[in-house]
Amino acid sequence: MTRPLRVCLIASSRFPVREPFMGGMEAHTHALASALIARGHHVSLFAAPGSDHRLGVTELPVATFRSSPTARGDVGSPPELWMQEHHAYLDLMLSLSRLEHGRFDIVHNNSLHPLPVALSRLVDAPVLTTLHTPPLPWLESAAAFAERGARFVAVSESVAHAWRHAVHASVIHNGVDTDFWRYGHGGGRAVWSGRLVPEKAPHEAVLAARRAGVPIDLAGPIHDASYFDSCVRPLLGDEATYAGHLDATDLRALVRGAAVAVVTPRWEEPFGLVAAEALSCGTPVAAYETGALPEIVDTRTGRLARVGDVASLARAIGEAVSLRREDARLRACRFFSHARMVDDYERAYRDVGALRPVG
């Protein structure tokens, strides 16, 4: 049996890794850290203040920063939150270079910040970065400074393709806890879950469900209050309700009891964790055909619609509700389980260590 690995896992400094999760990245980090610990690996998780203490978190030092009046007067002055995050990751990378947290077999960067990539050559361990989004300017530029043996993993074929001009990335699809997201027998309503922001377009899910004659429940954090008040709230009523920002247990009950899950990103969705969670519950998916969603949803488990086409999405909802729930559950267990994801990351960790340049 191979020995346990010492894993440094770098997370977001902005949102805590705890329930209710602010987004898919935080859920992914929590799941990965929990599974690695359960398998006997030694995980040091560096994450935002308030993260789940059961994961042995070292809080990233996001110190309050207040620039001087002179600095704030500069037209190019960045937001102070940007400076706080910059200092937090700079402090972390310098402390790792000085071995202040001990030695690691692998540093896994699960954040969107450029410094863990750009300063990877300072660290006395191979660095693997998970690409959770299509190229971002600051992250793309950082890749040019990455350590020679740095490795990149994309959460989908779609993301790997988008990054192909800058880095080569292997693909490890995200996974869901299929034991937690258990099979449910459905019901008469649709469900939409995620951050309530314009690029996720929950208002279009409501309009399409109304057109299909299927009531719908929305769940998730309101990140854009102005958008919610102007575009979503006026559509709410008996046939469209907002359930709030639910913890995982309550959200699971909503998804297991739904006839169909509606997924409406207006951008190139990097993965689509909510779609995989729905499939794990046996709930078919009606989604916009964008980003990685065609990798998750096939014709036996859902229907895809043209992005922004409410009429097309309504037809997808109407067709998806009649699909076999057993097929949805089977696809999630076969391709999108936590166990498969963690197996793939363990293999990647060992491979990147073995391939690390010497000298």
Image (tube, grey):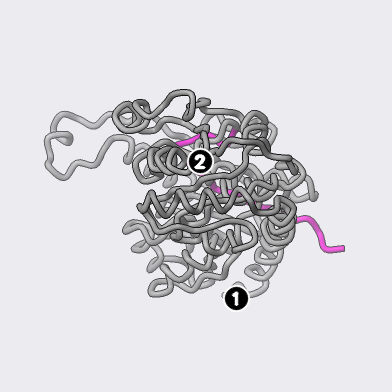
* Quadrant, the N terminus: bottom right
Instruction: Please tell me which residue lies in front, 115 or 278.
Output: 278
Q: State whether residue 162 is above or below residue 177.
A: below
Q: Amino acid at mark 1?
A: Val
Q: Amino acid at mark 2?
A: Gly
Residue drawn at the location 52% of the way across and 38% of the way down: 214
Q: Are marks 1 and 2 in contact (CB under 8 Å)?
A: no
> Does the magenta run of residues contain 15?
yes
Q: Secondary structure of the magenta portion, mostly?
A: loop
Structural distance between the alpha carbons of marks 1 and 2: 38 Å
- The dot on residue 59 is none
Circle 1: is it few (<14), some (14-19), or many (20+) Cα within 10 Å? few
Q: Which range of residues does the magenta coloring cover? A: 1-18
Instruction: Please tell me which residue lies in front, 193 or 7.
Output: 193
- The dot on residue 358 is 1
- Residue on which the image places disc 2: 23
